[in-house]
């Protein structure tokens, strides 16, 4: 064994701790921000750029992913409309940081055994 990595005592046990999750269903949330990321598609070998949307549900960070496409039929368009209907209606642009703190509802569904955000909705008006 080399000294390049910290060695563990053979008698030491490792505890695997899963991060907190949000139960399936619809939850009040707060938008925390968005960023682009790129990955290489294993099938095609092409680089794909997506948008990661962040939300907070009672102190638990939740992430949803959409394509970069912003057309009336895209998921990202619907999510943006839920967060900023005024921006979508005017077809103006806005930075994600300007939307941080906005309330919304997120819908969490099961996808392949994992909770995933399937939709973002406008908050219920009081």
Image: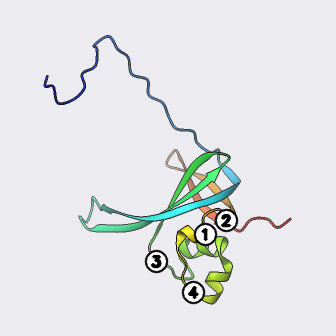
Decide if residue 34 is on the left or right side of residue 80: left
Percent position of residue 122, x then y: 71, 68
Query: Dot 4: within a 10 Å radius of its alpha carbon, few (fewer than 14), some, or many (20 or more) residues?
Result: few
Residue placed under numbered mark 4 in the picture:
92
Query: Dot 2: within a 10 Å radius of its alpha carbon, few (fewer than 14), some, or many (20 or more) residues?
Result: some
What secondary structure is found at the residue carrying circle 1? helix
Residue placed under numbered mark 3 in the picture:
69
Disc with the residue nearer the chain's start (4 vs 3): 3
Disc with the residue nearer the chain's start (1 vs 3): 3
Query: Dot 1: within a 10 Å radius of its alpha carbon, few (fewer than 14), some, or many (20 or more) residues?
Result: some
Whether the residues at callouts 1 and 3 have beta carbons within 8 Å, the answer is: no
* CA distance separating discs 2 and 4: 18 Å
Task: Single out the mark in the foreground, 1 or 3.
Answer: 1
Disc with the residue nearer the chain's start (2 vs 4): 4
Decide if residue 96 is on the left or right side of residue 123: left
Q: Quadrant of the N terminus?
A: top left
* CA distance separating discs 3 and 2: 22 Å
* CA distance separating discs 1 and 3: 18 Å
What secondary structure is found at the residue carrying circle 3? loop
Whether the residues at callouts 1 and 2 have beta carbons within 8 Å, the answer is: yes
Residue 102, label in figure: 2
Residue placed under numbered mark 1 in the picture:
99
Q: How is the image coloured?
A: rainbow
* CA distance separating discs 4 and 3: 15 Å
């Amino acid at each position: 064994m080399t000294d390049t990595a910290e060695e563990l005592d053979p008698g030491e046990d490792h505890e695997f701790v899963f991060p907190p999750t949000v139960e399936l269903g619809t939850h009040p949330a707060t938008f925390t921000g968005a960023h682009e990321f790129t990955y290489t598609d294993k099938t095609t070998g092409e680089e794909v750029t997506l948008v990661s949307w962040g939300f907070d549900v009672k102190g638990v960070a939740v992430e949803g992913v959409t394509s970069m496409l912003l057309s009336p039929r895209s998921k990202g368009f619907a999510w943006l409309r839920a967060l900023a209907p005024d921006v979508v209606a005017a077809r103006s642009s806005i930075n994600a940081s300007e939307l941080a703190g906005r309330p919304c509802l997120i819908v969490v569904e099961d996808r392949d055994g994992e909770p995933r955000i399937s939709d973002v909705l406008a908050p219920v008006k009081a």
